[in-house]
Each structure stands twice: as C-alpha cells, then as structure tokens.
Amino acid sequence: MPEELLTHSAEETIAWGRGFAARLKAPLMILLSGDLGSGKTTLTKGIVSGLGAAPEEDVTSPTFTLLHVYGTENSAQKVFHGDLYRIEKFHDFETLGMEDLFSKPAIVILEWSERFPLPSPWPQIKIRLEHAGGDARRITVTS
C-alpha cells in the first residue's frame, strides 16, 4: 500500500525526511519524481542528514553537477544524490559513471528518476512529491 502524507513547510518536509531515513538500510535506491520546485532536494536534505552522511545545509541540488556524494569511507552511510533533469540522451546518462554506484552498498537518491529508469539489483523506493498549495507538499511513497 502506498503511504501518503502532507507537509506544510520546507522545514516539515526536511523533518519528515530525517525520520524516514531511520527506516532505510543500504543498499537502496530512492527514486524521486515531481514537478520543478516540488521539494525533491528539500526532502533529500532531510534524508541525507537523517542518515548522518552530511548536515542538511550541505545538501544542494546536483542539477548542474549531476551527482553529489555525501559521507566518506568512514561515514556510517554513504549517499549518492543524482539529478537526471538535464540528461537528454542515453549517452549523457552513461557518462555519469553511475555503474560505479553499485560497487559497494549505499543509498542512491535520484531526482527526476522517471527520465531514465535505471535497472538495479537493489531494492527501490519511489517517492512522488506534488505541490499542494502554498508551501504544502503531498508526498507519496511506494516500494
């Protein structure tokens, strides 16, 4: 059954992401979808900080760099945060070097994941974020 909830601010979305992180165990792919400005990066801030990989203020959108890595080899959890928004062709996708992500168990969070479905041997959780008026966001989680 999908889980659906409503948050009313960016802070509430981040807090929900922190709590959600407690349920996660690597290896895992989190596939985020939603319109521009729907809160994908905001939610990721909470998840990454909840996993202890980086403080939420260090988590930024990888729209231009395409892939951020949080945590170190010594961290409790390594998190890869990718953004497929600017990927237009499969060749562009291949140049990301994402096959390296699967070399060790990690948490992989992909924004705009519907653009290029990535086959993975890892379990996947899909999260859809939608504008719900003002700063409110509807978050739907399916696995």
Image (spheres, helix red, strand yellow):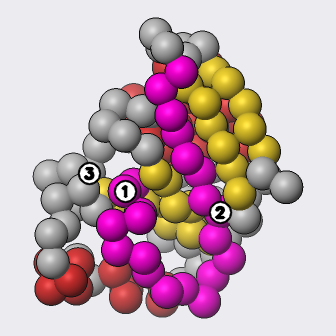
Q: Is residue 60 visible?
A: no
* Residue 91: % across, % down: 15, 86
Residue 85 appears left or right of 80? left
Q: How many marks?
A: 3
Reading the chain from its start, which is encountered first: label 3 or label 1?
Answer: 3
Q: Is residue 98 visible?
A: yes
Say which mark, if any, is on residue 125. 2
Q: Please state, as top left, top right, bottom left or bottom right, where the C terminus lies in the image.
A: bottom right
Q: In this picture, is 46 found above or below 118? A: above
Q: Please state, as top left, top right, bottom left or bottom right, where the N terminus lies in the image.
A: bottom right
Q: In this picture, is 21 found above or below 24? A: above
**Residue for badge 3:** 62
Q: Which residues are magenta?
A: 111-132
Residue 61 appears left or right of 121? left
Residue in the picture at 47% in, 26% down: 131
Task: Residue 67: name its quadrant.
Answer: bottom left
Looking at the rendered structure, the secondary structure element under dot 1 is loop
Task: Residue 20: name its quadrant.
Answer: top right
* Mark 1 residue crowding within 10 angstroms, few (<14) / some (14–19) / many (20+): many
The residue sitting at the right extreme is 1
Amino acid under disc 1: Trp
Residue in the picture at 41% in, 63% down: 113
Amino acid under disc 3: Pro
Q: In this picture, is 69 found above or below 61? A: below
* Mark 2 residue crowding within 10 angstroms, few (<14) / some (14–19) / many (20+): some
Q: In this picture, is 131 found above or below 48? A: above
Residue 128 appears left or right of 117? right
